[in-house]
């Protein structure tokens, strides 16, 4: 859990900003992001892809997940177990149920595999250098510190912030995809 007051203030401000984005604009932005994702070789060539089911005002990933499944790719979504997270393979949206934080997660009978080619990471805000601001629980940072894999943040252009305070446990993100651009961070 992140107790940095500066991060918490920034998180609240940026969540409010993102929450004020209309459904129609989110749908359009999500469609543009889905098209841009295919230009990233690490995503396009991946066979085992970690994704997430969106909550609140996150980028809509349902169409991305559906497209991946229809292409025969292996799709994995996170499941929170205690204070950590693991990825489980889904075959369709019927493989999901309400889990921790009322987020749609894979059911218990979905097979676990944390050795993925690429992971789409939910993001509240991100810096151009790949410092990600999440929800402050640290699940992704803990997972990515143990499981090295390519990472892609899906976010709105207005959520890219020049300076985000970096904690020592923060794992940098490799790619940022917005409705307007694709950024490869300086790694």
Image (spheres, rainbow, N blue to C red):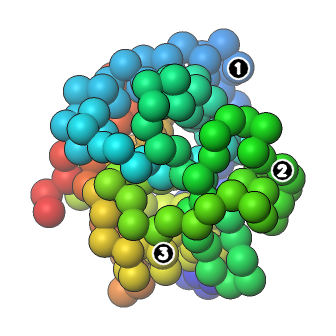
Residue at the spot of label 1: 23
Q: Residue drawn 68% across and 64% down?
A: 79
Disc 2 versus disc 3: distance between alpha carbons? 21 Å
Identify the residue under disc 3.
143
* Residue most extreme to the left: 186
- Residue 97 - label: 2
> Is 53 located above or below residue 125 in the figure?
above
Which quarter shows the C terminus?
A: bottom left
Residue 86 drawn at (x, y percent): 58, 70
Residue name at image x 23 percent, y 27 percent: 39
What residue lies at 13% left-to-right and 57% top-to-bottom?
A: 186
Rendering coords of residue 145 (x, y %): 38, 80
Callout 3 secondary element: helix
- Label number found at residue 85: none
Eye-nearest disc, 2 or 1:
2
Judging from the image, what secondary structure is the residue with disc 1 in? helix
Q: Earlier in the sequence, mark 2 or mark 3?
A: 2
The answer to which of marks 2 and 1 sits earlier in the sequence is 1
Q: Nearer the viewer, residue 77 or 121?
A: 77
Q: Quadrant of residue 12?
A: bottom right
Name above or below for residue 152 compared with residue 87.
Answer: above
**22 relative position to 129: left or right:** right
């Amino acid at each position: 859990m992140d107790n940095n007051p500066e991060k918490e203030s920034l998180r609240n401000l940026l969540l409010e900003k993102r929450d004020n984005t209309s459904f129609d604009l989110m749908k359009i932005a999500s469609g543009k992001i889905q098209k841009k994702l295919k230009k990233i070789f690490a995503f396009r060539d991946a066979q085992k892809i970690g994704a997430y089911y969106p909550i609140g005002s996150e980028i809509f990933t349902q169409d991305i997940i559906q497209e991946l499944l229809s292409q025969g790719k292996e799709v994995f979504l996170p499941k929170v177990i205690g204070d950590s997270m693991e990825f489980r393979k889904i075959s369709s949206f019927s493989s999901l149920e309400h889990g921790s934080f009322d987020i749609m997660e894979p059911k218990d009978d979905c097979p676990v595999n944390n050795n993925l080619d690429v992971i789409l990471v939910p993001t509240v805000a991100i810096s151009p250098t790949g410092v990600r601001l999440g929800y402050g629980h640290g699940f992704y940072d803990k997972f990515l510190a143990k499981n090295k894999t390519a990472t892609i943040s899906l976010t709105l252009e207005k959520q890219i912030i020049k300076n985000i305070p970096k904690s020592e446990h923060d794992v940098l993100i490799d790619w940022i995809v917005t409705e307007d651009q694709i950024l490869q961070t300086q790694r």
